Image: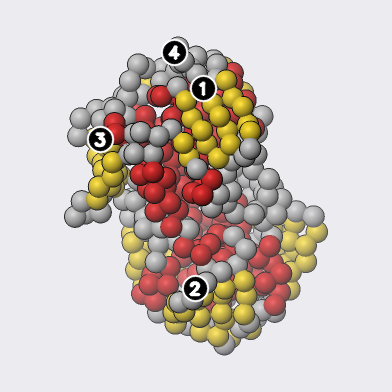
Amino acid sequence: MDKLLITGGKQLTGTLTVSGAKNAALPILAATLLSDKPVLIGNIPHLHDITTTLELLGCMGVELSVDEKLNIEVNSSTITKLEAPYELVRTMRSSILVLGPLLARFGQADVSLPGGCAIGARPVDIHLIGLEKMGADIKVENGYIHAKAKRLKGCSLILDQVTVTGTENLLMAATLAEGKTIIENAAREPEVSDLANFLNKMGAKISGIGTDVLEIEGVERLGVEDLHYNVLPDRIEAGTYLVAAAMTRGKIRLNKIQPKLLDAVLDKLSEAGAKITCGKDWIELDMHGKRPKAVSIRTAPFPAFPTDMQAQFTAMNSIAKGVSTITETVFENRFMHVQEMQRMGANIKLESNTAICTGVKNLTAAPVMATDLRASASLVLSGLAAEGETLVDRIYHIDRGYDHIEEKLSQLGATIRRIPR
């Protein structure tokens, strides 16, 4: 497995361009299965999960092509197979997102139960219950979801808990259902809104975008000529680099990012002592060479503080002035990075779903092992702020969600290199 070798202690300064959002690109690529016309998708990040998704679409017979600007054209009119096999789905939970589109457009789908990061239980029950309420016949056998429906019927759905992929799957399915579907307690994440906006560009009739109640008037078909859609910028990538600069007492400017996507994160960085300046599509952070102050956080669904930024802020708090509490309310196993940070000298105690962190002046380098995507990012950040050389193992996790992370950090002055397996 590849590893990252980081020599810490460098103050990060410079300018970066934010990549497209993985968590928007993946559902939008799945949504192209609903279109009977080719669709051109732009601002797609270069990530392992994107490659896996394209491989999944390709194995179904979908025609894919890339132009000179790295836009991906998806033509699902050539589809020959309505199955998402275990070999591809096992590494990426978001593969479940092909279930709703396949069922809605073709009346059948055979999708392997998903895998992904081991950060806690993320059952697909809400997806399946919602589809059954819309008239689907669903059986789960031998690790596969087998779904059939002549045409889905619109209905009222009240989700038992806020779920991003559940909202997205049911939203996509409802676009071609007969009649109106109302989804209450829907996820409000910007990536869900991006998907809904894309679906409307294809001819869907969705209202309530950005709220927790989505109304979808089903249509007979989706697809328009010459549709080109650019994916939303990645707020989690942006937040990660902002924290990296804060931890190293540096200064950074991020371009091609919408500040409103990061309101909760920017508020906490300001509280930590950073000077934050924003424009329409850029953010600047300046620590003026000062050590960050400890900030307490509590994760919750958007627009509250995102669970995908918890590990990075835990890393920052580990070297910040003062004591902080970090409470995780979304995933029960999302503190696996703490044990690795403790190996680097972090003073963190876990009590149920809360980490109590007393900041130390310096972390010390150590070999560490990543357990999931955001944990791996937090260990890289810890290495940037540590004394000595930190070796981060199992970085295939980070390649699932960060576009050329070592190259971008190098642009900011970090000493970091990939060691091939």
- What residue does disc 2 label? 2
User: In the picture, residue 406 is in which quadrant?
Assistant: bottom left
Q: Are marks 1 and 4 in contact (CB under 8 Å)?
A: no
Provide residue 291's location: percent of width, then percent of height: 57, 75
Label 2: element kind? loop
Label whose residue precedes the other's in the sequence (2 or 1): 2
Separation of residues labelled 2 and 1 (CA atoms): 42 Å
Residue type indicated by callout 1: Lys
Provide residue 204's location: percent of width, then percent of height: 36, 24
Identity of the residue drawn at 63% across and 33% down: 141
Q: Residues within 10 Å of mark 2 (few under 14, many from 20)?
A: few
Q: Residues within 10 Å of mark 4 (few under 14, many from 20)?
A: some
Provide residue 235's location: percent of width, then percent of height: 45, 53
Residue type indicated by callout 3: Pro
Provide residue 206's location: percent of width, then percent of height: 41, 24
Separation of residues labelled 2 and 3 (CA atoms): 36 Å
Is residue 341 at least partly visible in the picture?
A: yes
- What residue does disc 1 label? 148
Identity of the residue drawn at 55% across and 20% down: 136
Could you tell whether 231 is left or right of 117 in the image?
Answer: left
Label 4: element kind? loop
- What residue does disc 4 label? 178
Residue type indicated by callout 4: Glu
Label whose residue precedes the other's in the sequence (1 or 4): 1
Q: Are marks 3 and 1 in contact (CB under 8 Å)?
A: no
Separation of residues labelled 3 and 4 (CA atoms): 24 Å
Q: Is 362 drawn above or below residue 74 in the view shown?
A: below
- What residue does disc 3 label? 38
Residue 10 numbered tag: none
